[in-house]
Image: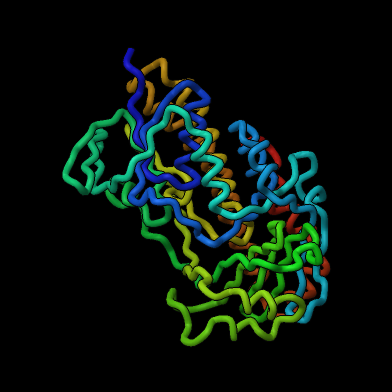
Amino acid sequence: MKPLRILVVGAGIAGLALARALENGGLTAEVVERDTAPHRSGTGMYLPANAVRALDRLGLGGELAAVGEPVERQRLLNDRGRVLADYTLADVWGDTGRGHALARGDLTSILRGSLVTTPVREAAVDTVADDGTVRFTDGTRETYDLVVGADGIGSQVRRGLFDAPEPRFLGQVCWRFIADGVDSGSLGRVWTARLGPGRTFLTVPLGDGRVYCYADLLSDRPQPPAGDWRALFDDFGGPVPHLLSKGDGARFAPLSEVAASDWVRPRAVLIGDAAHACSPSMAQGGAMALEDAVVLGEILTGAASGGPAALPEALAAYRVRRLPRVQWVLQQNHRRDRARSLPGPVRDLVLRLGGVRMVKANHAPLRAEP
């Protein structure tokens, strides 16, 4: 029997991780990306324990440990520096593992560098048909047994083939940057969120004098406000003013969500942000993408001997396995965002009295294998 012909659209975290998972199972996909030129996004990532576990299952735990910075604690402060909650990652994740932080570009480099047989080529998808025929923007056409949409929140595969809603703006905008030349040792191996009225400023040390900084703001429009955005956060204390001075060129984005549950067609499937982009409140966007890749790779490897005829049942099984977990994350993100948006004194009291308990409850089902 001929091997399955699989096209993965998108060479981000989800697409590259799936390609790695397929190679581990003896399968080879073709990956296309509209822009294959290497670029450093200038943003970082916090990978919670379930994301690290997924990378371990892909055989890349050692590579992560070599470039990532362990995260040992999480701390919530208000904008005046008062501690609202402080706990270890072991309190939340138990024996699931530890979290790591790293530059986003380092993670994609790890994933792409792990591929041996998988070609990654520059191409943009125009349309995808139900029979697996893909038309590229250069006018060429190819037919595949399976098309995987791993092309992010603006997924062309989702828009062209699935009856799914457009991304929903969450009423928040954000800025991300990496501050270099910082005494990051003074911050410890601590993920720290500072909560102000309608605003959050997050820091995660990356090691070697680098700190990943994330700032968000409640907003009724998905465009950046006028003026220098940093003035909106310069009343925060501690290291924030110094870090803001290093925020030239910060990457702006509106925060949106894709809450669809329609991910599967007989010859197509969506993974990662293309299927379920979410608020960064729980740092589970990358984790869900990595878990998607591990689970789909496992299911496709098991179904490969049955050829294309086995794909509809395999993809249906993938959706059944992943949907409850993804929906849980979306629901918990909403819960956490509502708590953060309470009036300051009420929010501070809620987090001081029940913040650790809430965080443990948010993550409890994610300690189980995906």
Where is residue 216 drawn, in percent x and y? 58, 72
The answer to whether 307 appears left or right of 334 in the picture is: left
Q: Is residue 70 visible?
A: yes
**Residue farthest to the top, as pictured:** 1
Q: Give the residue displayed 44% in from the left and 51% down from the top.
A: 38
Q: Give the residue displayed 37% in from the left and 56% down from the top.
A: 154
In the rendered image, the vertical position of residue 237 relative to residue 369, given as above or below: below
Q: Give the residue displayed 71% in from the left and 62% down from the top.
A: 209
Find residue 59 and report its image quarter: top right
Give the quadrant of the N terminus.
top left
Where is residue 155 drawn, in percent x and y? 36, 52
Q: Give the residue displayed 58% in from the left and 81% down from the top.
A: 230
Colouring convention used in this rendered image of the protein: rainbow
**Residue farthest to the left, as pictured:** 139
The answer to whether 104 appears left or right of 33 in the picture is: right
In the rendered image, the vertical position of residue 120 relative to residue 77, given as above or below: above
